[in-house]
Image (cartoon, rainbow, N blue to C red):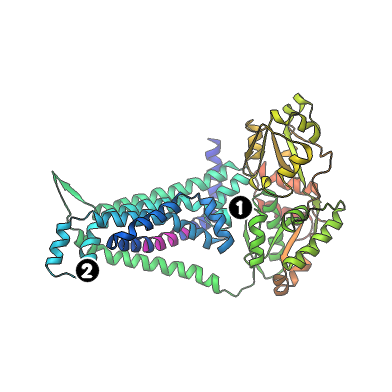
Amino acid sequence: MTLIKEILNLYVDKSDFFIELIGQHLAISLIAVLIASIIGISLGIIISENEKLASPIIGITNFLYTIPSIAILGFLVSISGVGNTTAIITLIIYALLPMVTSTHTGIKNIDERTIESAVGMGSTKFQILYKIKLPLALPVIFSGFRNMVIMTIALGGIASFIGAGGLGVAIWRGITTNNSAMTMAGSLLIALIALVTDTILRKFEKYINYRVTGKRTKILKINNTIKKYIKPIVIVIIVILIVLVSIFVPKIFKKDKKIVIASKPMTEQYILTEILAQLIEEKTDINVEIKKGIGGGTANIHPAMIKGEIDMYPEYTGTSWEYILKKKSRIEDPIKLYEEVKKGYKENYDLNWLGLYGYNSTYAIVINKDIADKYNINTYSDLAKVSDKLVFGAEYDFFEREDGYNALAKEYGFKFKNKLDLDIGLKYQGLESKKVDVINASTTDAKLKDDQYKVLIDDKGFFPSYLAGTVIREETLKDYPEIKEIIKLLDNNIKEEDIVKMNYEVEVDKKDDNTVAREFLVNKGLVK
């Protein structure tokens, strides 16, 4: 009951937020449905008229359908970038199979004697297709269409993974901030939209479906039904297209001042992007769009920065040095490391590091305190001695990056019993549920305030410093030079205790990240 109450309170308190997400979700889904319907039906007709093409085309759509959505998103991000375009293309790919197969099946199952009669009466191929095949196949086509629409609405939640809109934003934000009410609120709305849509489509399907009497199956009133409803359908589609054009075209051609700030999928980054956005909007006439929780973090944000899809984002010196600049050497002095990173970004990518916030968010190894007490573990070296009895969990990119698991394991000789890939927002839940015994973490994680966890000592100094600061495009600075002085207001203004406190307020006290950011700016005297 408590969770239900929290969800209802979220709907009331954040109604504007959810209404905006619903609009984005419907827009993304509808665009994908319209495009997939046109392409899918067209391909279905083509392979029905030319059976030689049926096997390869259906085979290709089947193959695409079996590829995990995350894999397709990851591939497309490198081509079409982050945001709505990639999300829509992904949804179209998954929507093609039901449309192609239902169209092909519907047309091929028509009684050949009906077609022969039409040919005998002198009908052209187009007339046979338009007046006989499509009307007779319509029930099967519409059945595939209905399934495709529901699937697209449900799958639309993945859009937020690459910085697009939709209700997946609420789900993803809830997961990364340990807010189960937010996750459920977004999930329930997607389910409700899918249910309502399915009910409407089922009602409409009755008017175009087959009717069966005894052993004889016949089609009743299909042509009349099509004539009756084709005009309203066309009108509705035109209205929808006009609405979509009115929403998206002005945004494409809009010349207002605007910058895009991105964040990785973690609470700390949500707060930092809100601080940056609110500070910029308070002191300038620039509009700020925030793309929160982009999956893959640096791996996807950095290429988007180079392409110009993102203008700025919070980053860490250690990540930039080893993951972006691919440097193997170690620089112990944190400030010297920052200067070298700043130089490397400017020379290689024409990107700027503008100042440092004032805290170090380096990696840490965290273990359940009862396990630490059981095996007397205080340092990474202590952990290595009993690692074969324990399970290690980390987010996906930690296992791949240069400064990640493999290098750490080599340095200390870790040989864990098992390793698990966990979403960054689920690692502590993994510890609590005893699914894992050890995780990688950040020294600024809110959960580290909890006495049930123990942060181990990096006795060989493996992890470099990860000073937090702002990365911004050179072109953005040229367009909006006033931003430079505004970002400098944050120089050495966010201490480690500040960011830990803010993380705790969001993850444990369940406060909104934008509210926490505002309170910080007011307390620091940076905004009124």
Describe the element under mark 1 as helix, strand or loop.
Answer: loop
Counting residues from the start of the chain, the first of labels 2 and 1 encountered is 2
Residue 87, horizontal then vertical, whole percent: 51, 58
Pinpoint residue 500: horizontal percent, then vertical percent.
75, 45
Disc number placed over residue 125 in the picture, else none: 2
Q: Main secondary structure of the magenta part?
A: helix
Within-10-Å neighbours for mark 2: few <14, some 14–19, many 20+: few
Residue nearest the viewer, comparing 53 with 357 = 53
Residue, x 46% and y 56% (percent of image)? Answer: 91
At numbered mark 2, what does the secondary structure look like: helix, strand or loop?
helix
Label drawn at residue 295: 1
Which residues are the magenta region?
28-38
Considering only vertical position in the picture, is 308 above or below 469? Answer: below
Work out whether residue 445 can be spotted: no
Side of 152 relative to 160 (left or right): left
Q: Position of residue 92 (x, y in %)?
A: 44, 58
282 magenta-colored: no
Amino acid type, label 2: Lys
At label 1, which amino acid type do we have? Gly
* Residue 493 visible (yes or no): yes
- Residue 489 % position (x, y): 80, 62
